[in-house]
Image (spheres, coloured by chain):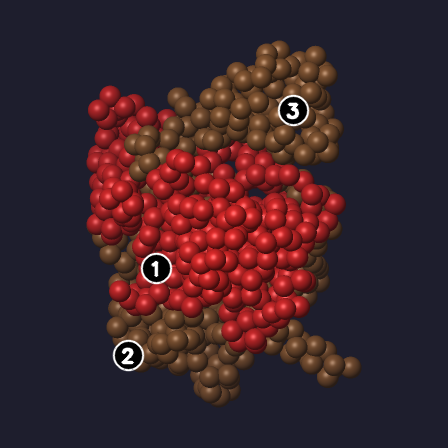
Amino acid sequence: MSKMRADTAHEAFSSAALAGLRVIDLTTWRGHLCGRLLADMGADVIKVEPPGGHDGRTIGPFLNDEPHRDRSLFFWFYNLNKRSLTLDLEHQRGIEILRKLLESADIVIESFEPGRMDELGLGWQAVSGLYPALIMLSITPFGQTGPYRDYTADDTVLTALSGMLYVNGFPSRAPVRPLGLQAYHSSAYYAAIGTMCALFARDRAGVGQWIDLSMQEGTASAVEHVAGSYFGTGAIEPRRGTLHWSRYFRVGKCRDGYIMHCTLGDWTSLVQWVAGDGKAQDLVNPEWEDVVYRAAHAEHLFDVLDEWVKDYNRDELLERAQTLRLPYATVRPPEALLDDEQLAARGYFVEVEHPELGRTFRYPGAPYLFDGSPWRVYRRPPLVGEHTAEILHEIGIDAGETESLMAEGII
Amino acid sequence: MAALPLEGIRVLDFTWVVAGPVATRILADFGAEVIKLERKPGPPGSRQIGLQGDLHRNKHSIAVNMATPEGIGIARKLAMVSDLVIDNFSARVMRSWGMDFASLSQLKPEIVCVSMSGLGHTGPRSNYVSYGPTLQALSGYTLLMSEGGGHPAGYGYSYADMSGGYTGALASLIALWHRRRTGRGQFVDLSQFEAVTSVIGPALLDIAVNGRAQGPFDYRSQEKPSAPHGVYRCRPRDGDDDRWLAISVCSQAEWEHFIGVLGSPSWTSEARFRTLYLRMRNSADLDARVAQWTATQVAEEAMERLQRAGIAAGVIANGQDLCERDPHLQARKFWGTVTLPDGQRTHTTGIAARLSSTPGSVRTPSPLIGSSNHYVLRELLGLNQTECDDLVTARAVWPE
């Protein structure tokens, strides 16, 4: 029985897309999503934490709002599927162990202040000499060069400097910050993309390289129209409230909540429906059939449509709109995702067992469904230093040495 | 020119609108040969500048009429010489052309197919019609982008399109890597709805595990506790009063440095601002005080002084700040330049991940529709000129 289970586990691992790749994750909480994206697809990602535990473990929310280093949901989200090794990098012996670890690795991800890896004797020049096939990814707020190199930023400051924050909110009022840590998240995806590209290059040339990921640039690359408009026409994109810059979408208010209007669907179906409710006003005129005209006169168009939807319930409106192939949506709170039929049917939320707590928790799941080498949960987020002994054993450090390292507080 | 990391990978690209083209643009930037199959003849105007230019640069374009059997034949032949076929349709479209993974993999088992539909190929809502702005409404972003829980204040753009795009690029690369290792192709069913839901982050786990409703919106830090933390209006610049600074102050040491920059006015020594806990509790009063200071400051100068003191501060950049005035992005030469066929030069968004030895690059502008017909039909598919002419006559291929 136990053998069968081991075989099944082995098969799952070898069918994983990134099986066989080892990643050393030295990042702070600002960079740790990238390693998670690789771990979810089967890479062996080792989170290196200081002996007391990673800083990210002190950030909430916490399970039941009780602060505890192994119960930070913030840490859980970003570290699912990783293993944890504690290592004191302030100590020379800690650095030596890290070097040994890098020998076995394909990728190292770090998000220290620029120059810190050099101080540790692990700058790119040193690392590439020692481990020519290693790929090093540095994720920092502003990158490794330029006048802001040593500046500091959190997610809010990054969304400011990348053009993301300015365009959200109402014209004459304060800009509104995006939900979630989108500067970190979009940068993590670009970081993972860069890493995959470096793997393809290494496959051909045999050598690794250094990836300089500036989160300001990663975030600026995740705003579609600000630079496009400025370079295209010289226009500074303003804040427009809920009117989308394309002028085909705006939020409207139903009896029981909000909906997103969209005027890109089949116009005849929409206008027949609105006219049937006696609310079409001038929308029956032929000029509205022209999609460009609809964008040019969006304010009036949406005002008429707002009058029309206000007596509907939003779910009723959504179902009828979609039946007519009109791309409407309800504007829901994120809590609604938990009961969403579509996500449920596709198994989006997954149950992750935390044996140390005797409980199972629902986690958000796969951003993509691979039919041959699926996204999966290999292990819950690690406890502090949970895999230290096993990882040290893998790189040839014996039990006696491990014990003395522990006594010295290095692991 | 340095080698490109994705050289040798060919992508047949059916995507349109924004999310799909973002995904294939990223692959093209890093050297994949992306052949954009356009299903209609081009408009006479140009799509080479602005957002459209950004979306399609570095790509080839072929114009194929998929309503004809000959057009479908060309597309299928092209799939046979490609590594990746990517679309953003609902399930039935590619199936109706015999271009879905099930059909193509019978002829070429190592093909990778990525479909980036709105809500996925399976499930009761798989036929919903959607766009980026409607998907982010469904996933919670739009409602929480409000001021103090009131009427939604708006996302100014479709983050769902961008998250769908970079998720699509990453999925493509991971599937291609798996193929390189195992020789096996596969199908990736990417729901853009799930992609944008996945970047909500820890807040989603807070909902799922603690059952906590999120919002209403405020400027509370979503990472380390911090106060002041928010956006503060600055002194007008050249008659523009829409100038703002984002500031985040975490530790006690940072607070000491922060009030040093302000010149330690008397309010900063008030008991109610003494500790981080108290500053967070009294954040409304604190924010009003900080805003009084920023109102006397030029945003750029205040940012500079705060950063020199080790405080996270940044100008809330508008398009001009971002593209023209930000000295850091200029020094790093972030913005790319392309030369259009008429000799005009235009700028374009740069490449976010900088690889030291095989960097991605901006090489060619967004193509005119059908401009690679000759290359694709003659060189890739080996047709002769008569066969190409026949395709045009049969209206299976539109000329450039």
| Residue at the image point whose x is 50% and y is 83% from the top | A394
**Residue B18 in sight from this viewpoint:** yes
Residues at marks 1 and 3 touching, judged by CB atoms closer than 8 Å: no
| Residue at the image point whose x is 63% and y is 34% from the top | A327
Callout 3 secondary element: helix
Give the number of marks: 3
Eye-nearest disc, 1 or 3: 3
Callout 1 secondary element: loop
Tell me the number on the disc at residue A268: 3
Say which residue label 2 marks. A129
Amino acid marked by disc 2: Gly
Rounded to the nearest whole Å, what is the CA distance between mark 1 and mark 3?
45 Å
Chain at tag 2: A
| Residue at the image point whose x is 21% and y is 50% from the top | B331
Chain in red, by letter, is B
Mark 3 is surrounded, within 10 Å at the Cα level, by few (under 14), some (14 to 19) or many (20 or more) other residues, namely: few
The residue sitting at the front extreme is B386
Amino acid marked by disc 1: Gly
Please report whichever mark, 3 or 2, sits nearer to the chain's N-terminal start.
2
Chain at tag 1: B
Q: What percent of the width, then of the height, locates residue B118? A: 61, 45
Q: Against B127, is A244 above or below?
A: above
Say which residue label 1 marks. B360
Q: What percent of the width, then of the height, locates residue B393? A: 52, 48
Q: Nearer the viewer, residue A70 or B381?
A: B381
Amino acid marked by disc 3: Thr
Quadrant location of the N terminus of chain A? bottom right
Q: Nearer the viewer, residue B309 or A108?
A: A108
- Chain A image colour: brown
Q: What percent of the width, then of the height, locates residue B147? A: 50, 28
Rounded to the nearest whole Å, what is the CA distance between mark 3 and mark 2?
67 Å
